[in-house]
Image: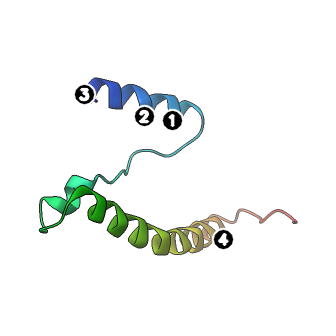
Amino acid sequence: MNHEEINQAKEVLRKAGYHVDSLWHVQDITDRYECDADKAYEILTDVLDVSVEMVFSSIHDQAMFNEIKEKEQ
């Protein structure tokens, strides 16, 4: 994919309500470490799985800081 196709895809996702301003690519790993794209993808998956919990916690903290009431479940 070229840069323009990627930007178009991101815009589609953004319009659907997704946050796409911080994306990671396997090249972020392969440029720094001696591994192939498959291993880099595994690394990103493992790291981002852990990060999701921290993101939800931070979202909660920011909502409370901004005095946004949590919805009843």
Q: CA distance from mark 4 to mark 3?
A: 41 Å
Asked if marks 2 and 3 touch (Cβ < 8 Å), the reply is no
Give the residue number, with chain letter if any, for mark 3: 2
Q: CA distance from mark 2 to mark 1?
A: 6 Å
Residue 39 drawn above or below residue 3: below
Foreground disc of the pair 2, 3: 3
Give the mark, 2 or 3, whose residue is nearer the N terminus.
3
Task: Give whichever of 60, 45 is nearer the camera.
Answer: 45
Give the mark, 4 or 3, whose residue is nearer the N terminus.
3
Few, some or many C-alpha atoms within 10 Å of disc 3 (few <14, some 14-19, many ≥20)? Answer: few
Q: Which mark is residue 14?
A: 1
Three-letter amino acid code of the residue under disc 4 = Met
Foreground disc of the pair 4, 1: 1
Three-letter amino acid code of the residue under disc 3 = Asn
Q: Quadrant of residue 72?
A: bottom right
Q: Residue at x 33, y 25 (%)?
A: 5
Secondary structure beneath dot 4 equals helix
Q: CA distance from mark 2 to mark 3?
A: 13 Å
Percent across and percent down for residue 43 are 33, 69
Percent across and percent down for residue 53 are 55, 74
Percent across and percent down for residue 52 are 52, 68
Secondary structure beneath dot 3 equals loop
Q: CA distance from mark 3 to mark 1?
A: 18 Å
Q: Which mark is residue 10?
A: 2
Three-letter amino acid code of the residue under disc 2 = Lys
Three-letter amino acid code of the residue under disc 1 = Arg
Q: CA distance from mark 2 to mark 4?
A: 29 Å
Foreground disc of the pair 4, 3: 3
Asked if marks 2 and 4 touch (Cβ < 8 Å), the reply is no
Give the residue number, with chain letter if any, for mark 4: 64
Task: Give whichever of 63, 53 is nearer the camera.
Answer: 53
